[in-house]
Amino acid sequence: MLISTFKYLIKESVGFVLRKFQVHVLIKKLNNNKSLYFVFNYHSFSKYNNYKIKRGSILETGYGDNFDKQIKFFNKHFKFSYPEVFFESVSTNQHSVLVTFDDGYKDNYDMALPVLQKYNASAIFFIVTALTGSKDMLMHDKIRFLVEQRKISKNYLDIPNKINEGENLYDEEVINKVNSVFAEQKIPKRSLMNHDELNEICYKGFKLGVHTHNHNPLIFLNKESQYYEIKSCIDYLSEIDSIKYIAYPNGLVNDMVVEICQDLELKYGFTTQRGFNIKQEERLKIKRIGINVSDSLNVIVLKLALNYIKGLY
C-alpha cells in the first residue's frame, strides 16, 4: 500500500507541474506544421482496473464523473476525429484525438455513451463477439474474478500480464481449470454488451470494430485460426455497422495478421504501442495511449507528455 501511495503521489505531482505549465498546449505549438493524432485506449469502468491507490471489486463500477472531466478536457484542447478523417485530410496542424474502448463491456454503454454524446466525441467500440450478451467473461476477467473470490491461486494473475508481454501462457490446462471453476459461480450481472446495445451505439453515431470472436491473442494462432477469429467477428458486426477497424487482442500483431486484415478489407488497425500518430503512419498499426477512467487530468497530461516523447523516437 505504501509503494502504491508513493507512485500515485509522484504521478500526480509531476502531472500537476506539467499541467500548470500547459505542456499539452506546448505540444501543439511545437507541431504547427505537422498534424498529430492521439488515440486513447480505454477498457471498463471496473474499480478493479480503475483506482487511485487500492483496487476495488471487479464487478463494481465507478468514476463516471471523472470520465466526463477527461472527455471535456479532450474536447477543449483537441479535435475529435475518426481515423479516415484524420489520415485522409489534406490539412495540416490538425491535432486530433480518438477515444477507443476494447472488449465491449456493458459499462461502456451505461456510463461512457451518455458522456460521449454530450461532447459529440469520436469513439470506436471494439467488440468480442462470441461473448456478446452473455454472463460469460473474458479469460483475464475470469481469472481476476476467481482470485478475488478466492477460488484460484493469486499466481494466476501473472498470466494476463505475461500475455500482454507476448508470452503464450493460455495453455489447455489453464483454460480448462479456469473455465471449470468459473462455471460453478453465480454471476450477478452481465458484464458485456448485447446486440441491442451495440445497435444503439451505432444509431447514436458511434462506430464498432473487430476485437476478434474469442479474444484469443492472434500471434499465437495459425493462419487459419487467425482468419476465423477476425472473419467471424466481422460477420457478426456487419449486421449492425460497416466494419473497417480492428484492435488486436492484447495489442499483439504480426505480418500474417496484417495480411489477413488487408484481405478482409479492414482499413485501420489499433495496437497498444505507445506514442502519437502522424499522417504517414502505417494504417494497420496505429499507436494508442492507455487511459483509465480513474486518471486525473494531471495524470492525463503526464501521459500525453510521455507518449509525445515516446513518439519522437
Image: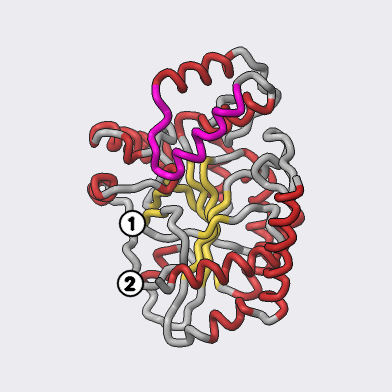
**In this figure, which residue is indicated by the disc labeled 2?**
280
User: Which residue is at 47% across, 48% downward?
Assistant: 208
The way the protein has been coloured in the rendering is secondary structure
Classify 10 Å Cα crowding around label 2: few (below 14), some (14-19), many (20 and above).
Answer: few
220 relative to 249 in the view: left or right: left
Q: Closer to the camera, 134 or 284? A: 284
Residue 99: x and y, percent? Answer: 55, 58
Disc 2 marks which amino acid?
Gln
Q: Quadrant of residue 116?
A: bottom right
- Magenta part of the chain: 153-171
User: Which residue is at 70% across, 24% downward?
Assistant: 188
Numbered disc 2: secondary structure = loop
Between the C-alphas of marks 2 and 1, the distance is 12 Å
Q: Closer to the camera, 71 or 89? A: 71
Residue 160: x and y, percent? Answer: 50, 36
User: Which residue is at 61% across, 28% downward?
Assistant: 154
Disc 1 marks which amino acid?
Leu
**Can residue 50 be seen in the rendering of this structure?**
yes
Considering only vertical position in the picture, is 250 above or below 88?
above
Numbered circle sitting on residue 260: none
> Which quadrant, please, contains the C terminus?
bottom left
87 relative to 63 in the view: left or right: left
Numbered disc 1: secondary structure = loop
Considering only vertical position in the picture, is 77 above or below 10?
below
User: Which residue is at 29% across, 48% downward?
Assistant: 254
Considering only vertical position in the picture, is 83 above or below 250?
below
**In this figure, which residue is indicated by the disc labeled 1?**
284
Residue 158: x and y, percent? Answer: 53, 35
Residue 239: x and y, percent? Answer: 42, 39
Q: Quadrant of residue 173?
A: top left
Classify 10 Å Cα crowding around label 1: few (below 14), some (14-19), many (20 and above).
Answer: many
